[in-house]
Image (cartoon, rainbow, N blue to C red):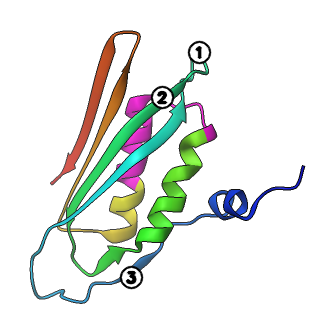
Amino acid sequence: MEKKYGEIAIEEAQLEAWDNPYPDRDYLIEITFPEFTCLCPRSGYPDFAIIKISYIPKNKIVELKSLKLWLNKFRNRYISHEAATNEIFDALWNLLQPKKLKVVADFHPRGNVHTVVTVEKP
């Protein structure tokens, strides 16, 4: 079966940074990604989460379509809640070098367990 254009876009997705239009001003950017999915590395069951990203940019901001497609790359990966959250944080930190960054992954309860993982710097 031939891949659909969306599957190809997700497969090839790379995070993209744009120049901050107001580098002389501190302002907060908040992004919510309510349909994050990945796979449990132990069971293979799907995990669903709301990813919340907030940052104060320095010289770069993240291009939103690239972020959306890149986050969708996790949907077929076997990865723990902790590893996924930290990987998202590290990728954004390295790309943007912001003044401040916070990533919160609020995973939907599964097996009567609700997990929230937060990574923040500085």
What whole-number distance in Å separates the C-alpha atoms at marks 2 and 3? 31 Å
Magenta span of residues: 76-90
Q: Amino acid at mark 2?
A: Asp
Question: Looking at the image, which residue is at 54% across and 60% down?
Answer: 69
Whether 15 is drawn above or below 110: the answer is below
* Residue underneath mark 1: 43
* Residue underneath mark 2: 47
Where is residue 37 shown, x and y percent of the image? 50, 38
Question: Looking at the image, which residue is at 24% across and 68% down?
Answer: 98
Q: Element under label 1?
A: loop
Q: Element under label 3?
A: strand
Where is residue 107 shown, x and y percent of the image? 35, 30
Tags 1 and 2 in contact by the CB under 8 Å rule?
A: no
Q: Amino acid at mark 1?
A: Ser
**Quadrant holding the C terminus:** bottom left
Question: Looking at the image, which residue is at 43% across and 45% down?
Answer: 35
Where is residue 97 shown, x and y percent of the image? 29, 68
Q: Residue furthest top?
A: 112
* Residue underneath mark 3: 18
Q: Amino acid at mark 3?
A: Trp
Question: Looking at the image, which residue is at 46% across and 28% down?
Answer: 80
Q: Is residue 79 magenta?
A: yes
Count how many numbered circles sit on residues in the image. Answer: 3
What whole-number distance in Å separates the C-alpha atoms at marks 1 and 3? 38 Å
